[in-house]
Image (cartoon, helix red, strand yellow):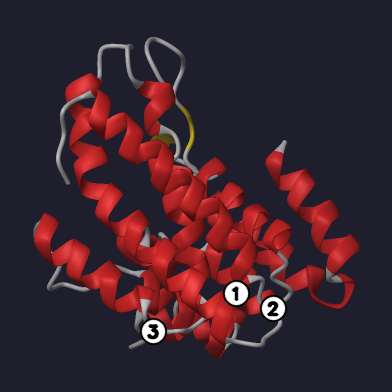
C-alpha cells in the first residue's frame, strides 16, 4: 500500500522527520476515509487518500526533503474537503482550520496548505486558472505541491478516455492544460534561477513532459486551449 511506501521512504530519506510525515499521512487517511476517486470505466473507485499519498511520494522522489512541504502535500485537500471534521475532532474552541493544522503540524505546513487551497474567489474556470498562475510564480515550495497535484490529476486524463467519461475528461483537459503549462514554465525558470534544496528541475522536467502529452491529446480532439 502507498501509506507503507511513504513511511518507508520517509524513514530512509528523512529519518529525523518521519514522525511528522507519518502523522500527517494518518490524518489524511482518517479525514478522507469516506471519499473515493474515479479510476476508469467500471473499475471500482479507489480510496481518495491514494491521491495525496501519491502527491507526497512524488515530491520526495523529486528531491524535496522539507518535512513540512511533504506534510502539506498529504493535507493539501483538507481545507476544501474535510475542514468541518478536522475541527470537530481535533480543533480547539474558536480555531480555524489553518490554525488547527499549524498547531498540529507546524506553521510552515499550514502556510503551504493555505497557498495551494483554492480561495473563495475561485468560482469558475477563469478564476481557477488565475489562482494557479499566481501560485506558479510565487516562488515558494507550494508550487511543487501544486505541480505534483496536477501531475496526478491531469496526468491521469489520457488513461481515462474511452471508458464512457470522455466528455468529462475533455472538460478537465481544458481546465488543466493551461495550468500545467504555467507551472511547467515557472518551475523551469526557478530551476535556472534558484539555488535551493528543492529539485525544481526534476519537477520541471516532469511537468514539461506532461504539457507535451496533454497538448498532443488536445490536438487529437481538436481542442484549442
Q: Which residue is mark 1?
A: 69
Whether tag 1 and tag 2 are in contact, CB under 8 A, the answer is yes
Is 172 displayed left or right of 113 in the figure?
Answer: left
Residue 220 picture quarter: top left
Is 157 displayed left or right of 147 in the figure?
Answer: left
Q: What x and y, as percent, mark residue 208? A: 48, 53
Residue 61 picture quarter: bottom right
Mark 3 to mark 2: distance in Å?
Answer: 18 Å
Q: What x and y, as percent, mark residue 163? A: 33, 12
Q: Which residue is mark 3?
A: 138
Q: What x and y, as percent, mark residue 94? A: 33, 88
Mark 1 to mark 3: distance in Å?
Answer: 15 Å
Location of residue 6 with respect to 14 vertically, above or below: above
Which residue is found at the position 30% from the left and 58% from the top?
A: 179
Q: Is residue 81 visible?
A: no
How many dots with numbers?
Answer: 3
Q: Which residue is mark 2?
A: 66
Residue 204 picture quarter: bottom right
Label 3 Cα neighbours within 10 Å, binned few <14 / some 14-19 / many ≥20: few
Is 41 displayed left or right of 100 in the figure?
Answer: left
Q: Which mark is residue 180?
A: none
Q: Secondary structure at mark 3?
A: loop
Location of residue 174 with respect to 27 vertically, above or below: above
Q: Which of 17/151 is in front?
A: 151
Q: Secondary structure at mark 2?
A: loop
Mark 1 to mark 2: distance in Å?
Answer: 5 Å
Amino acid at each position: 500500500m502507498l501509506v507503507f511506501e511513504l513511511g518507508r521512504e520517509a524513514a530512509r530519506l528523512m529519518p529525523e522527520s518521519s514522525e511528522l510525515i507519518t502523522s500527517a499521512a494518518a490524518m489524511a487517511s482518517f479525514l478522507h476515509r469516506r471519499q473515493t476517486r474515479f479510476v476508469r470505466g467500471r473499475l471500482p473507485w479507489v480510496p481518495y487518500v491514494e491521491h495525496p499519498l501519491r502527491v507526497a511520494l512524488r515530491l520526495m522522489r523529486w528531491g524535496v526533503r522539507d518535512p513540512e512541504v511533504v506534510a502539506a502535500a498529504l493535507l493539501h485537500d483538507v481545507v476544501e474537503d474535510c475542514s468541518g471534521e478536522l475541527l470537530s475532532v481535533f480543533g480547539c474552541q474558536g480555531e480555524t482550520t489553518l490554525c488547527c493544522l499549524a498547531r498540529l503540524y507546524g506553521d510552515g505546513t499550514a502556510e503551504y496548505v493555505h497557498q495551494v487551497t483554492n480561495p473563495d474567489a475561485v468560482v469558475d474556470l477563469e478564476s481557477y486558472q488565475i489562482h494557479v498562475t499566481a501560485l506558479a510564480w510565487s516562488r515558494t515550495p507550494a508550487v511543487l505541491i501544486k505541480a505534483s497535484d496536477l501531475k496526478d490529476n491531469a496526468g491521469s486524463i489520457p488513461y481515462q478516455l474511452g471508458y464512457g467519461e470522455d466528455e468529462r475528461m475533455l472538460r478537465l483537459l481544458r481546465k488543466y492544460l493551461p495550468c500545467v503549462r504555467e507551472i511547467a514554465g515557472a518551475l523551469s525558470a526557478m530551476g535556472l534561477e534558484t539555488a535551493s534544496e528543492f529539485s525544481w528541475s526534476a519537477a520541471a522536467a516532469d511537468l514539461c513532459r506532461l504539457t507535451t502529452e496533454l497538448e498532443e491529446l488536445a490536438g487529437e480532439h481538436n481542442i484549442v486551449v
